[in-house]
Image: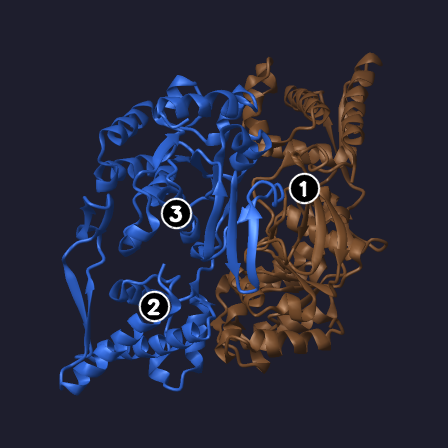
Chain colours: A brown, B blue
Amino acid sequence: MTTNTDARDQLIDLAADFYDQFAAGEIPEMELPTRTKSNIEYDEESGVWTYGDRTSVRSANSVNGARKLLKAAYTIEFLAEQLDEDRSSTLRELYYLSESWDNDEAQFSSQDESNDLVEDLEIVTGATREDFHMRPEESGAKVMGPLRLREQTNRGDRDIHCQLDVGQGGYQIPNNPDTIEFLENDAEFVLCVETGGMRDRLVENGFDEAYDALIVHLGGQPARATRRLTKRFHDELDLPVVVFTDGDPWSYRIYGSVAYGSIKSAHLSKYLATPEARFIGIQPADIVEYDLPSDPLSDSDVNALESELEDPRFQTDYWEEQIELQLEVGKKSEQQSLASRGLDFVTETYLPERLEEMGVA
Amino acid sequence: MTTNTDARDQLIDLAADFYDQFAAGEIPEMELPTRTKSNIEYDEESGVWTYGDRTSVRSANSVNGARKLLKAAYTIEFLAEQLDEDRSSTLRELYYLSESWDNDEAQFSSQDESNDLVEDLEIVTGATREDFHMRPEESGAKVMGPLRLREQTNRGDRDIHCQLDVGQGGYQIPNNPDTIEFLENDAEFVLCVETGGMRDRLVENGFDEAYDALIVHLGGQPARATRRLTKRFHDELDLPVVVFTDGDPWSYRIYGSVAYGSIKSAHLSKYLATPEARFIGIQPADIVEYDLPSDPLSDSDVNALESELEDPRFQTDYWEEQIELQLEVGKKSEQQSLASRGLDFVTETYLPERLEEMGVA
């Protein structure tokens, strides 16, 4: 976690670079890694995919390029002030706020433009959006399990036990989970769950109590805050992480975003991704073994599976075997289809068997 | 709120009706209100829109009809058992669970079918899905404000103050907010907010503290739990409710679902809708008055506005004036566009002015 002062200094340094280039009679420019699929590489050391060596240059040698750097300068000024005042804002507010800037040329013409610029600033400074105090639109999901934490809010610290001090809905992950300090925990592992219905089933059946699991609700494609907190559970509490989703190619991507990061945010993989996270199911092998209610794969499912076979993040023996099996049987199943064996099958049979197989619990 | 025993008895009564019809040599049938737009009426007494007098009959006089009643009988048995055991399940689990029933004819062929059946049972018994302990897939949103409540969870009671005992993310509304008891509150009004970005802005700026507001995050189209809790705040704590959304036709529908209920769930309006809820903005008049950053109305926006002019729920002088103004200026604006006047404009100027105009605070 970068402090307000660090992030602010990194931004100011960047503005100082522009200034120095001007002073030296050079055309100001900013160098960035090329952000395409062909420029992501596996980083052996950290086990995540990050940008490679190819770079692109944003230069003021065209009107368009000069305007981009002008916008960067205005944004840096706004962010530095925001950090000074210990405030925060959303990406969308930044976009609208640019209308109040005194130079019309500095106004963003679309929100994509301001979003992209903030990502550029993350990459160039090595800080994160959260360090700049930019909040996401989507909120993080919720946690239930044997953990007492302290959240630093702008109204003071709050000590919360994620079973004893929360309702059935659990502890709501704040936008920036780096404001959380872990106080005490009895957890054995982290179980990330895709759907709300399954999360509620596990909580109703007391799975977090019986297995000392931290149940993290992903809620579809997980927000950055959810992925960051999951990574912190793994790294700081030394807990194994397993991911439980539907058994279809779109859900494997949800697993992928927890474990490997995404191409769009490859510069943040070391901050957001948990490469040690393992997939617990629904596996194609489970659809066959438990004869789960299923739907036939659609054409777009088949295309997505084939594209995963080509995706470097899925090129392991495990995933090749599972994806090929799924293409062969032509079926997909949802997590909740386990209910066809009764409402307790998932907590009394399926998860315990899988966790034992995986050597987790 | 219906107790487990009440809901169970109502279901059993329905099954008993089928039995009696059989015993009397009649073909069993079930009568339901016709669920179309043409059969919803304004209920003067409660101020909400409910189903009118037209009814349809589900009769076992065809194979298809007989199969529907068979499925109803199996579902009633499952729900009665669930209530006996004080457990709960999701609609999706019910669908999958039907695969385990001993009669193949009773299995649902799609989830739409099981969802519709549960709605039918709500209508016929006068109980709600929550009374049957059917959980939704979507979870409720979150609350921040001066309220201490007691939530009855399946692990015991939890006393929670929705400012002092929660993190920045607030109190997570449980699936069934009828498990909540209100202990103490200093709230003056309820402010329902559409987007997460705006909710976070209000919380960061301490609006709930400064104005003693209960800030309820709607998160787009609000879940039943969120609407139910809002209604309880109004009815039981006697608090005015205002709804703050983007300024476009889709957001007016969000307001409408809080205030008037939906056609699909008109049988639940008395349970879910808060007809006294008022719209605070973004009003078309605000787009003009504050010269907010806006986007042009698309064709589908125009169509949606025109269809709202025809919708009985929007046939008030206020809405006709606002919608006609919007069609005239041809613009829509998001809540967060208020940031073009600075990050504090919404909490220091816009909301205080509107609340005073409306006589709320």
Query: If the image is split into quadrants, where does the N terminus of chain B sit?
Result: bottom left
Looking at the rendered structure, the secondary structure element under dot 1 is loop
Residue B232: numbered disc:
3
Query: If the image is split into quadrants, where does the C terminus of chain B sit?
Result: top left
Q: Nearer the viewer, residue B233 or B265?
A: B233
Q: Position of residue B281 (x, y in %)?
A: 39, 30
Label 3 marks which chain's residue? B
Label 1 marks which chain's residue? A
Q: Position of residue B78 (x, y in %)?
A: 39, 77
Label 2 marks which chain's residue? B
Q: CA distance from mark 1 to mark 3?
A: 31 Å
Relative to A152, say whether B38 is above or below: below
Q: Residue at x 42, y 66 (%)?
A: B133
Q: Quadrant of residue A64?
A: top right
Q: Earlier in the sequence, mark 2 or mark 3?
A: 2
Q: Which residue is mark 2?
A: B7
Residue type marked 2: Ala
Looking at the rendered structure, the secondary structure element under dot 2 is helix
Relative to B216, say whether B115 is above or below: below
Q: Are marks 2 and 3 on the same chain?
A: yes
Q: CA distance from mark 2 to mark 3?
A: 20 Å
Residue type marked 1: Asn
Would residue A296 be visible to someone looking at this image? yes
**Closer to us: mark 1 or mark 3?**
3
Q: CA distance from mark 1 to mark 2?
A: 43 Å
